[in-house]
Image: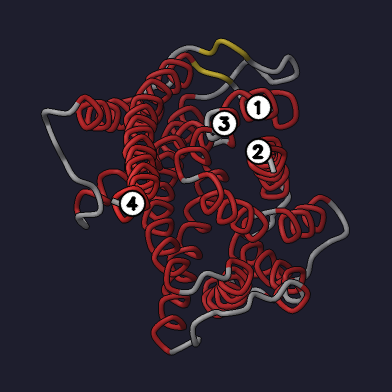
Amino acid sequence: MDCKKEVLPFTAMAAVECITVALNTIFKAAAFKGLSYWVFVAYVHLIGTLVLLPLPFIFPRRGLPSFNLSIFFKIVLLSLIGFSANICEYKGIEYSSPALASAIGTLTPAFTFVLAVIFRMEIVDLGSSRTRAKILGTITSISGAFIVIFYKGPKILSPPSQPQSLSLETLETSQANWVVGGLLLVGLCLLTSIWYILQTHIINIYPSELTVVVQYAFWTAVVAAAVGSIAESNLGAWRLRPDITLISVLLSGGFGPVFSSVVHTWGVRLKGPVYVAIFRPFSIAIAAVAGVIFLGDDLYVGSVIGATILLLGFYAVIWGKAKEFESDHTLEANLEGSLDESKKLLPRNQQS
């Protein structure tokens, strides 16, 4: 039981972060080869659906409520949000880098907190240190994201094979792409936060993770194919060449968004959203190193400063949530203890 509750979740979450960084790095290399992100998203979710399709039948859940139209439409809405998030993610990485995607990804808990307050899922008590930490962490995280996006600064790490002479026009284009990519990645974080909230709602009313994720993957593939057929009218773009583009699609289809959705849904159910979110910063350092080594990306002072501020804000939000869960668990333990004491005293009162 300890292994299932401690070692297995830790291993799974850490593995997902490492796999996500690796897949983003491979996608960036495939994008250099001309892989369309519209084609990529459609194929990835189609493969993911085929991989996961047998699992609900192999591991069926009994005692589930009836699958009605309300749940169906919510899953379709979840697919639309997920598809939009995927486009923001891969287009953002194409314009910027996997390292920037990992750094800005720490905004997700802050956005989730803001949305939870808006939808009255979170109680704001300004007199509580937990609430103040979450508000301060949210503001700090957003500030760090602005620094990462709008300030590059001098290079502190550069691949040795990169040419040193770049024209002013090239530099301006690179800076503009970096800003656009960063804003797309901020959009990804906002959509991901909305996705988590809707996903939690769906799982609460229909607690079958595999069924929900399989249907989510299928309808995301349908949406991606429909939109992609309009946005990418060149039929040649849908033919995958036997090179890094095919490798990227196959690996991301088997271990990408669909796989991570299953693991994160399972992790949230087993350990809670705070535990899952804690693993996000691990990917920043991995992505930065992988980008420099494999993609020839540069590492800038602004990225380091902004990522550091993002991390401080991230951990402030996480600290506030952790204290909140700790308080809730303490209250539950005290209530259980009181009930046990009452049960012990009950027979004595009856005897008297």
Number of the front mark, 4 or 1: 4
Its colouring scheme is secondary structure
Q: Which mark is residue 99?
A: 3
Circle nearer the N terminus (1, 2): 2
Confirm or deny contact between disc 3 and disc 4 (CB under 8 A). no
Confirm or deny contact between disc 1 and disc 2 (CB under 8 A). yes
- Residue bearing mark 4: 346
Q: Which amino acid does label 4 sit on?
A: Leu
Number of the front mark, 3 or 4: 4
Residue sitting at 47 percent across and 75 percent down?
75
Number of the front mark, 3 or 2: 2
Q: Which amino acid does label 1 sit on?
A: Ile
- What is the secondary structure assignment of the residue under circle 4? helix
Circle nearer the N terminus (3, 4): 3
Confirm or deny contact between disc 4 and disc 1 (CB under 8 A). no
Query: Separation of disc 1 and disc 3 at Cα?
Result: 8 Å
Q: Which mark is residue 286?
A: 1
Q: Quadrant of the N terminus?
A: top right
**Left or right for 277, reference 97:** left
- Residue bearing mark 2: 21
Query: Separation of disc 2 and disc 4 at Cα?
Result: 58 Å
Query: Separation of disc 3 and disc 4 at Cα?
Result: 61 Å
- The image position of residue 51, as x and y in percent, is 77, 69
Query: Separation of disc 3 and disc 2 at Cα?
Result: 8 Å
Q: Which amino acid does label 3 sit on?
A: Ala
**Residue placed most toward the observer, 288 or 19:** 19
- What is the secondary structure assignment of the residue under circle 2? helix
Circle nearer the N terminus (2, 4): 2
